[in-house]
């Protein structure tokens, strides 16, 4: 866990998830982030969650993008299933 002036930033956090999309904040590589997301929120599908390669965030930010709280160590990633 790393610290931020206002709060703690964990190494992996699910920011939002729904039926087909999920977004996470992470300091891990793609393989570990994918493993953790599938562990915390299993889809029940054979392929599970996979990083979205052709989508941007609803805010228009690229995928992945830097975390605004901890840009040196964390990034946000959009997943789909």
Image: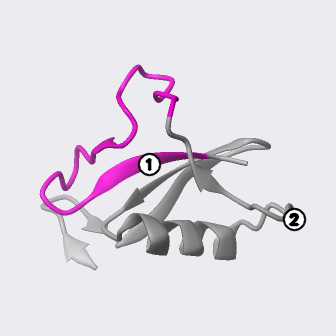
What colour scheme was applied to this rendering of the protein? one colour
**Residue stretch in magenta:** 54-79
Question: Relative to 74, does residue 78 appear above or below in the rendering?
Answer: above
- Residue plotted at (42% across, 69% down): 12
Question: Which residue is denoted by mark 1 in the rendering?
Answer: 77
Horizontal and vertical percent position of residue 27: 30, 67
- Along the horizontal axis of the image, is 67 left or right of 81? left
Residue 69 lies in the magenta-colored region: yes
Q: What is the quadrant of the N terminus in the image? A: bottom left
Asked if residue 70 lies left or right of residue 27, the reply is: left
Residue 17 higher or lower than 13, as above or below: above
Please give the name of the residue rendered at 42% of the width and 64% of the height, measured from the top-left corner: 30
As drawn, 53 above or below 41: above
Residue in the foreground of this view, choosing between 54 and 3 = 54
Question: What residue is drawn where x is 40% and y is 56%?
Answer: 25
Specify the label residue 43 is tagged with: none
Q: Is residue 41 magenta?
A: no
Could you say where residue 41 lies in the image, as x and y percent from the top left?
71, 66
What separation in Å lies between label 1 and label 2 (alpha carbons)?
21 Å
Drawn side of residue 7 relative to residue 33, left or right: left
Main SS, magenta region, reads loop
Q: Kindly identify which residue carries mark 2.
A: 44
């Amino acid at each position: 866990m790393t610290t931020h002036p206002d709060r703690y930033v964990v190494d992996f956090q699910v920011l939002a998830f729904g039926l087909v999309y999920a977004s996470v904040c992470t300091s891990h590589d793609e393989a570990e982030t994918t493993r953790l997301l599938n562990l915390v929120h299993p889809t029940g599908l054979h392929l599970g969650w996979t990083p979205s390669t052709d989508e941007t965030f609803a805010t228009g930010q690229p995928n992945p993008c830097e975390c605004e709280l901890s840009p040196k160590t964390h990034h946000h990633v959009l997943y789909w299933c």
